[in-house]
Image (cartoon, grey):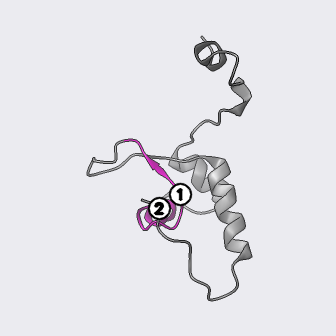
Amino acid sequence: MTASQILGAAVPAATFEHFVDGDTAATFLGITRRTLLQKVRDGKIPGHALDPSAGKKDWRFLLSELHAYMLSCDQRPPGARKPPRRV
């Protein structure tokens, strides 16, 4: 059963974006997985914990959010503060 069948015809299936794991997200950003996870824990890069209450979190990422993050970094002047941490 597809997403459009579950939700009905109001939401086309093409609007859904799949989450990717840390390895794929790190490759997309051109950094190591370890650096990616450190930046996510510090709130510098957007990520979604599968179980927010877990001690060791398993993170997933949307490539569109990572792309928007990269664009926002390019638009900040040198020395400017980073966006506030996402909670």
Residue 37 is one of the magenta-drawn residues: yes
Number of numbered discs on residues: 2
Say if mark 2 contacts mark 1, CB within 8 Å.
yes
Nearer to us of marks 2 and 1 is 2
Q: Nearer the viewer, residue 9 or 23?
A: 9
The three-letter amino acid code for the residue at tag 2 is: Arg
Looking at the rendered image, the quarter that the N terminus falls into is top right
Q: Which residues are magenta?
A: 34-50
Q: Secondary structure at mark 1?
A: loop
Residue 84 is one of the magenta-drawn residues: no
User: Percent position (x, y) of residue 75?
Assistant: 73, 75
Above or below, 65 relative to 14: below
Task: Tell whether 48 sits left or right of 1.
Answer: left
Identity of the residue drawn at 51% across and 61% down: 36
Please tell me which of labels 2 and 1 falls first in the chain.
Answer: 1
Q: Which circle marks residue 46 in the picture? A: 1
Give the spatial CA distance, label 2 vs label 1: 7 Å
Identity of the residue drawn at 66% across and 54% down: 28
Task: Tell whether 39 sits left or right of 51.
Answer: right
Above or below, 6 relative to 39: above
Q: Seen from this angle, which residue lies furthest bottom?
A: 79
Above or below, 77 relative to 40: below
Residue at mark 2: 86
**Mark 2 neighbour class, 10 Å CA radius: few under 14, some 14 to 19, many 20 or more:** few
User: Percent position (x, y) of residue 45?
Assistant: 54, 62
User: Percent position (x, y) of residue 59?
Assistant: 44, 48
Above or below, 17 relative to 23: above
The three-letter amino acid code for the residue at tag 1 is: Pro
